[in-house]
């Protein structure tokens, strides 16, 4: 049995309409924002004020991220104001005198308040790592990295980056007659001098000498 041509054309729109109704609905994409600012404790609530702003947001966290626990520990140590660098979702809140609420999904660091809001190099920083005993610090940008060690002149070095499984990074440099390697892993790390909490652990190797510390991603990178 053959169908006539008009009948075939009549069936095609029906098939197309069936396809429309069987498609799965697309879930709306959640907008995440990275923000830095001050964290204060007021009447049992954690209030977040972004750098250079007057707005205030209630911090809403279910405990999975760990920011509330870390912040409360630092407040218990006698710090009145903290600096926090985090990424999450801005939401509305009906509480009077509040501009909304912030729900963090990633915390890069929380530390006693310092001059972090006025750090002019933050936006260009890819990675920052530091440790103690002996003190060392390394700042990484897209142009290179600068290694500071106690009792030595700062060293500007080129580097090669290698992406490793589980979000780990390896930065290496061979210059000025020395081998420098920085290994970074996604592991919560506490600075044993300041109490600051950072989201990465770091291991620096200079000509075979191993130095350990903490690290965080700067404003030039949001992995």
Image (cartoon, rainbow, N blue to C red):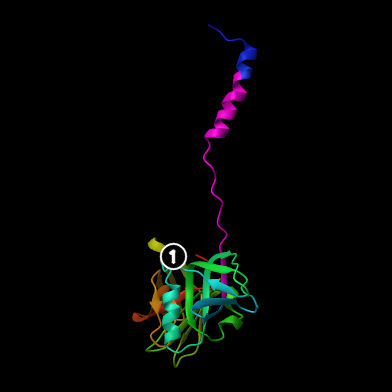
Which stretch did the figure color magenta?
11-36
Percent position of residue 148, x then y:
48, 85
Mark 1: few/some/many CA within 10 Å (<14, 14-19, 20+): few
Percent position of residue 103, x then y:
52, 66
State the residue position of label 1.
Answer: 162
Secondary structure type for disc 1: strand
Percent position of residue 205, x then y:
37, 78
The image shows residue 160, relative to residue 131, as above or below, that is: above
Q: Is residue 98 located in the magenta-colored stretch of the structure?
A: no
Percent position of residue 53, x then y:
65, 77
Q: Is residue 28 located in the magenta-colored stretch of the structure?
A: yes
In this view of the protein, which residue sits in the foreground, 79 or 99? 99
Query: From the viewer's perspective, is 77 left or right of 85?
Result: left
In this view of the protein, which residue sits in the foreground, 105 or 184? 105
**Residue in the image at 57% along x and 33% along y:** 20
In this view of the protein, which residue sits in the foreground, 181 or 73? 73
């Amino acid at each position: 049995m053959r169908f006539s041509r008009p009948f075939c054309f009549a069936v095609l729109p029906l098939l197309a309409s069936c396809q429309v109704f069987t498609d799965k609905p697309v879930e709306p994409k959640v907008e995440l924002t990275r923000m830095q600012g001050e964290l204060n404790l007021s009447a049992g609530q954690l209030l977040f004020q972004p750098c250079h702003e007057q707005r205030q947001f209630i911090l809403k966290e279910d405990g999975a991220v760990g920011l509330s626990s870390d912040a409360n520990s630092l407040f218990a140590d006698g710090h009145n104001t903290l600096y926090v660098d985090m990424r999450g979702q801005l939401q509305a809140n009906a509480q009077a005198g509040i501009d909304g609420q912030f729900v963090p999904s990633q915390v890069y660091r929380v530390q006693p308040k310092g001059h972090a809001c006025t750090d002019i190099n933050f936006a260009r920083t890819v990675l920052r790592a530091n440790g103690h005993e002996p003190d060392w610090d390394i700042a990484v940008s897209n142009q290179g990295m600068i290694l500071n060690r106690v009792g030595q002149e700062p060293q500007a070095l080129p580097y090669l980056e290698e992406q490793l499984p589980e979000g780990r990074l390896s930065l290496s440099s061979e210059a000025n007659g020395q081998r420098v390697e920085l290994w970074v892993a996604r592991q919560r790390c506490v600075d044993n001098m300041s109490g600051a909490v950072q989201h990465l652990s770091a291991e620096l190797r200079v000509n075979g000498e191993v130095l350990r510390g903490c690290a965080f991603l700067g404003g030039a990178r949001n992995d």
